[in-house]
Image (tube, coloured by chain):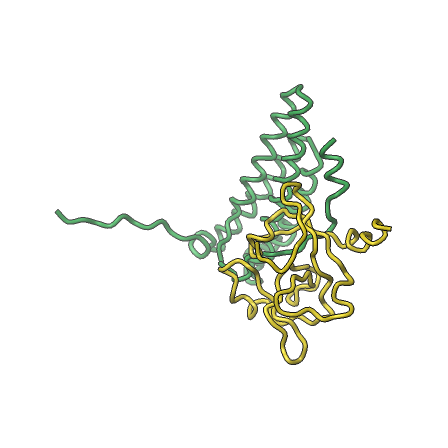
Amino acid sequence: MLLAALAPSWRRRVAVAGHSMEPLLKEGDWLLVDPGAYGDRRPHGGDLVVAHDPRDSRRLIVKRVLGVAQDGRLALAGDHPAHAHEADRIGAVDVEDVVGRPWLRYWPPHRFRLLTDRRD
Amino acid sequence: MLSRVQRALAPRATAHAHCDIPCGVYDPQQARIEAESCYKIIQKYQESSDELFRTRCIHVKEERAELAKHHIDVMWHDYFKPEHLEKFADLHEVCWKAAKQASLVKRSLDIAEAQKLLDLIDKIDHMWRETGGPSSTRMQPMQPMQAAS
């Protein structure tokens, strides 16, 4: 039963590329992503999301929700202090383009932990 | 054994947490360093009969080849611009072949394939230099202050 519950997240697992989400997520981290996390509720400020890049829908990005615009679209940014103002660069993301919520950092083994709203 | 487990656990997709400023720093040397590491690791693998060492070689080579591919992708998608195609009509083909070659090196222990990857990265480096890469994308070292005496 546990495996059945994990299956959707397992199918959506991703590898992190890049540094904008440090210190929480580092290049090479592997994450389980829950595709149903934002089914009943919309993402809000502080949530972690994996979404299609509005600049290139073939790419996935992993960021934190900075805020929600009145039209419901999301402003995303990285946690790293150098990336605090990149929401304008990325552009607003439609909720429909959110793939899910990364909830477990499962590789490398010494970085295994549940992901919460904490940034470290 | 660890490598088989890792392959089974590995994700199929990448989620980018790139520097999206963008910071504007691009240099094919990042890819070349990782590709050189792959080449040297394959050499050391061939020279060793220690199974544990050889297992570690495979594991680390896969990591470095993936990084080489990442840096090639960054050059391709973020540095090169449409106007560069006027000078290098085969720009997309070279970058595509280099990325494919990095994937091949990831799963191969053929040193000739590792050399092919280095050669393709050198082509990218040539295109980067000929399009003004070094002056436009790298900081110049600061000159020491002069002290009059």
Residue at horizontal 21 percent and vertical 49 percent from the top:
B146
Q: Residue furthest left?
A: B149
Residue at horizontal 15 percent and vertical 49 percent from the top:
B148
Q: Which chain is drawn using green? A: B
Residue B6 against residue B70 in the figure, above or below = above
Compared across the picture, whether B13 is left or right of B140 comes to right
How far across and down, in percent of the image, does residue B68 sit?
60, 44
How far across and down, in percent of the image, does residue B119 sit?
58, 39
How far across and down, in percent of the image, does residue B65 sit?
63, 40
Front residue of B135/B54: it is: B54
* Residue A41 shows in the view: yes
Front residue of A9/B73: it is: A9
Q: Number of labelled discs? A: 0
Q: Which chain is drawn using yellow? A: A
Q: Quadrant of residue B88?
A: bottom right
Residue at horizontal 57 percent and vertical 40 percent from the top:
B34
Residue B41 against residue B99 in the figure, above or below = above
* Residue B75 shows in the view: no
Compared across the picture, whether B111 is left or right of B132 comes to right
Q: Residue furthest bottom?
A: A70
Q: Quadrant of residue A73?
A: bottom right
Residue at horizontal 63 percent and vertical 46 percent from the top:
A28
How far across and down, in percent of the image, does residue B57 sit?
64, 30
Residue B84 against residue B38 in the figure, above or below = below
